[in-house]
Image (spheres, rainbow, N blue to C red):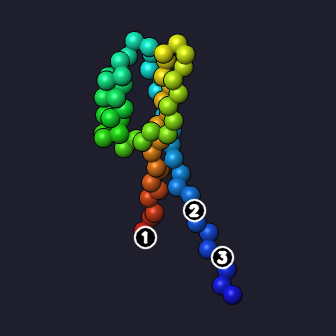
Amino acid sequence: MPPPTTVRQPEYEFRSVVLPRSVSRKAATRLLTDHAEYGHWELDRLRLFPDGTRRVTLRRKIIRQVRTW
C-alpha cells in the first residue's frame, strides 16, 4: 500500500484595515476593490461595529519561489 500523500494548505499573509464611520459605503467599496485589483488581496472578514466603524481583514497567498540549480 503506498504511503498517504500530504496536501499542503496554502499560506496567506493578512492585512487589517480599519475604516472609520465617516467613510461612505461607496468609498469603502472603491478602496477594497483597489486593494483586490492592484495588490491581489481578497476579503477574509469584515466586521461592522455599532458605532459604524468597519474592521476589514484582507488576505493573499504567499507564493514561494523554488530554486532551480
Kind of residue at badge 2: Arg
Which residue was labeled with disc 2?
Answer: 8
Q: Is disc 3 surrounded by few (<14), some (14 to 19) or many (20+) residues within 10 Å?
A: few
Q: Which mark is residue 4?
A: 3
Q: Is disc 1 surrounded by few (<14), some (14 to 19) or many (20+) residues within 10 Å?
A: few
Q: Secondary structure at mark 1?
A: loop
At horizontal 47% and vertical 50% (from top left) the residue drawn is 62
Which residue was labeled with disc 1?
Answer: 69
Image coordinates for residue 61, horizontal then vertical, percent: 46, 49
> Of residues 63 and 65, which is closer to you in this image?
63
Q: Is disc 2 surrounded by few (<14), some (14 to 19) or many (20+) residues within 10 Å?
A: few
Where is 59 relative to 17, above or below? below
Image coordinates for residue 54, horizontal then vertical, percent: 48, 22
Which picture quadrant has residue 35? top left
Kind of residue at badge 3: Pro
Image coordinates for residue 42, horizontal then vertical, percent: 42, 42
Tell whether 28 sits left or right of 60: left
Which picture quadrant has residue 24? top left
Which part of the image, by quadrant, shows the C terminus? bottom left
Kind of residue at badge 1: Trp
